[in-house]
């Protein structure tokens, strides 16, 4: 993170502690051998990585109670609602 063009700025909370940082990239040059993904594809690569960070197994576990509550309260007499539930179950592997 000490490459020219990379600026790391701590984000301070109300207690003035810093657990997170903002990272700014300005005209950073990366050697071809160090590229991750394709040249010019940093934004889409970052978005894919964030999906894993923000939607990992911990997210599934923490949302289980909410999912179960929604499943119990859903209007399962409605065909569209049933289809949405099945689709979501397939998406998260609950079949």
Image (cartoon, rainbow, N blue to C red):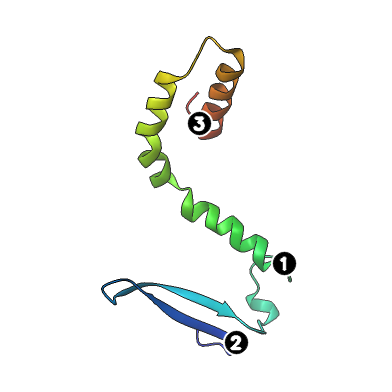
Which image quadrant for residue 13? Answer: bottom left
The residue furthest top is: 77
Local SS, label 2: loop
Question: Left or right of 30: which side holds 1?
Answer: left
Per the model, the C-alpha gap separating discs 1 and 2 is 20 Å
Classify 10 Å Cα crowding around label 1: few (below 14), some (14-19), many (20 and above): few
Question: Left or right of 36: which side holds 52?
Answer: left
Residue plotted at (50% across, 31% down)? 93
Local SS, label 3: loop
Residue plotted at (56% across, 84% down)? 6
Which image quadrant for residue 78? Answer: top right
| Image mark for residue 6 | none
Q: Position of residue 68 (x, y in %)?
A: 38, 26
From the image, tell me which residue sits under label 2.
5
From the image, tell me which residue sits under label 3.
93
From the image, tell me which residue sits under label 1.
38
The residue nearer to you, when weighing 94 against 82, is: 82
The residue furthest left is: 15
Q: Considering only order in the chain, which callout, 2 or 3, is on the residue closer to the N terminus?
A: 2
The residue nearer to you, when weighing 57 against 75, is: 75
Q: Considering only order in the chain, which callout, 1 or 3, is on the residue closer to the N terminus?
A: 1
Residue plotted at (48% across, 81% down)? 8
Classify 10 Å Cα crowding around label 3: few (below 14), some (14-19), many (20 and above): few
The residue nearer to you, when weighing 46 against 12, is: 12
Q: Considering only order in the chain, which callout, 2 or 1, is on the residue closer to the N terminus?
A: 2
Q: Position of residue 3 (x, y in %)?
A: 56, 87
Local SS, label 1: loop
Q: In front of the other: label 1 or label 2?
A: 2
Per the model, the C-alpha gap separating discs 3 and 2 is 42 Å
Q: Does residue 23 sit above or below 57 in this rendering?
A: below
């Amino acid at each position: 993170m000490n490459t020219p063009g990379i600026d790391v700025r701590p984000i301070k909370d109300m207690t003035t502690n810093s657990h997170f940082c903002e990272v700014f990239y300005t005209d950073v040059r990366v050697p071809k051998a160090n590229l991750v993904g394709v040249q010019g594809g940093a934004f889409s690569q970052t978005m894919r990585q964030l999906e894993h960070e923000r939607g990992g197994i911990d997210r599934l576990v923490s949302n289980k109670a909410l999912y179960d509550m929604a499943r119990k309260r859903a209007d399962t007499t409605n065909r569209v609602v049933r289809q949405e539930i099945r689709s979501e179950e397939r998406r998260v592997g609950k079949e």
